Image (cartoon, helix red, strand yellow):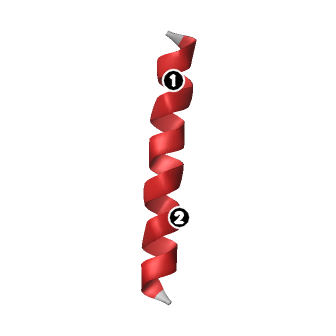
């Protein structure tokens, strides 16, 4: 359960990072 929570947050962090990188 906790692992799924961290994996979900990690996925959002990756998408957020890519969206910021592409916006430059």
Relative to 1, does residue 20 appear above or below in the rendering?
below
Relative to 22, does residue 18 appear above or below in the rendering?
above
Q: Position of residue 6 (x, y in %)?
A: 56, 28
Q: Position of residue 18 (x, y in %)?
A: 46, 67
Circle 2 packing at 10 Å, graded few (<14), some (14-19), many (20+), is few
Q: Position of residue 8 (x, y in %)?
A: 45, 33
Looking at the image, which residue is at 43% across and 71% down? Answer: 19
Which disc is residue 18 wearing?
A: none
Relative to 15, does residue 11 appear above or below in the rendering?
above
Measured Cα–Cα span from mark 2 to mark 1: 18 Å
**Residue 22 in which image quadrant:** bottom left
Who comes first in sequence, dot 2 or dot 1?
A: 1
The secondary element bearing badge 1 is classed as helix
Which disc is residue 17 wearing?
A: 2
Q: Position of residue 16 (x, y in %)?
A: 48, 61
The secondary element bearing badge 2 is classed as helix
Looking at the image, which residue is at 51% across and 23% down? Answer: 5
Looking at the image, which residue is at 50% across and 90% down? Answer: 24
Q: Residue furthest bottom?
A: 24
Residue at the disc numbered 1:
5
Residues at circles 2 and 1 in contact by the CB criterion of under 8 Å: no
Circle 1 packing at 10 Å, graded few (<14), some (14-19), many (20+), is few
Looking at the image, which residue is at 54% across and 17% down? Answer: 3
């Amino acid at each position: 359960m906790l692992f799924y929570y961290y994996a979900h947050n990690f996925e959002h962090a990756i998408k957020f990072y890519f969206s910021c990188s592409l916006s430059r």
